[in-house]
Image (cartoon, rainbow, N blue to C red):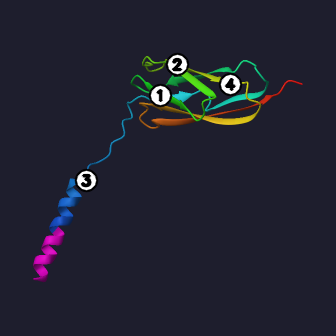
Amino acid sequence: MKKVILLICLSVYLIDASAQEAVVLNSNGAKIKFDSEIIEYGIIQQDANGNRELKFTNIGKEPIILQSVNSSCGCLVASWTKEPIAPGKSGVIKVQYDTKRVGKFEKTLTVLSNDVDRPSIVIKVKGEVLAPK
C-alpha cells in the first residue's frame, strides 16, 4: 500500500513539474525611455502657464503604443501621442496643471504602454503655486 501511495505522489509531482511553462522575456519588443520621470514645475505664480511636455523615445525594436495616461487628480490633465512610435523615434505627453490652485503639489501620472519590461510607469509631477502678493 505504501508503494502505491508513493507511486501516485511521484506521478503527480512529475506531471505537475512537466506542465510548467517557461517564461521568456521578449528582448525584441517595444521599450520606452523618458527624458525624465519627474515633471518639475518649480515655484510658479497663480494662473501661470501650467503646460509642460514630457518627451520619450522608443529604444526597443517594435513600435511603442501608449494605451493611456491617467492622472492622480482632476487638476492634472494629460494628452499623448496616439499613433505608434517607431523604434528610435520620439513622442510627447502634454501635461496641464491647474495653476489656480495655490500651494505645494505632488501628483502622479501613470503611463500604460506595450513596453515589454515596464508596461506601467509612474511619473511624478510636483511644484508650488504662489498666491499673488
Seen at 36% across and 40% down, the residue is 25
Question: Disc 1 on helix, strand or loop?
Answer: strand
Question: Counting other residues with Cα less than 10 Å from the Cα at mark 2, is it few (<14), some (14-19), or many (20 or more)?
Answer: many
- Badge 2 is on which residue? 91
- Badge 4 is on which residue? 98
Question: Disc 4 on helix, strand or loop?
Answer: loop
Q: Main secondary structure of the magenta part?
A: helix
Location of residue 99 in the rendering, given as x and y in whole percent from the top left corner: 72, 24
Q: Amino acid at mark 4?
A: Asp
Q: Marks 1/4: CA distance?
A: 20 Å
Q: Residue furthest right?
A: 133
Q: Residue furthest bottom?
A: 1
Seen at 42% across and 19% down, the residue is 84
Question: Counting other residues with Cα less than 10 Å from the Cα at mark 1, is it few (<14), some (14-19), or many (20 or more)?
Answer: some
Choose the circle earlier in sequence order: 1 or 3. 3
Location of residue 44 in the rendering, given as x and y in whole percent from the top left corner: 78, 25
Q: Marks 4/3: CA distance?
A: 51 Å
Choose the circle earlier in sequence order: 1 or 4. 1
Circles 1 and 2, Cβ within 8 Å, touching? The answer is no
User: Which quarter shows the C terminus?
Assistant: top right
- Badge 3 is on which residue? 20
Question: Disc 3 on helix, strand or loop?
Answer: loop
Region rendered in magenta: 1-10
Q: Mark 1 or 3, which is nearer the eye?
A: 1
Choose the circle earlier in sequence order: 1 or 2. 1
Circles 4 and 3, Cβ within 8 Å, touching? The answer is no
In-front residue for pair 72/32? 72
Choose the circle earlier in sequence order: 3 or 2. 3
Location of residue 3 in the rendering, given as x and y in whole percent from the top left corner: 11, 80
Q: Amino acid at mark 1?
A: Ser
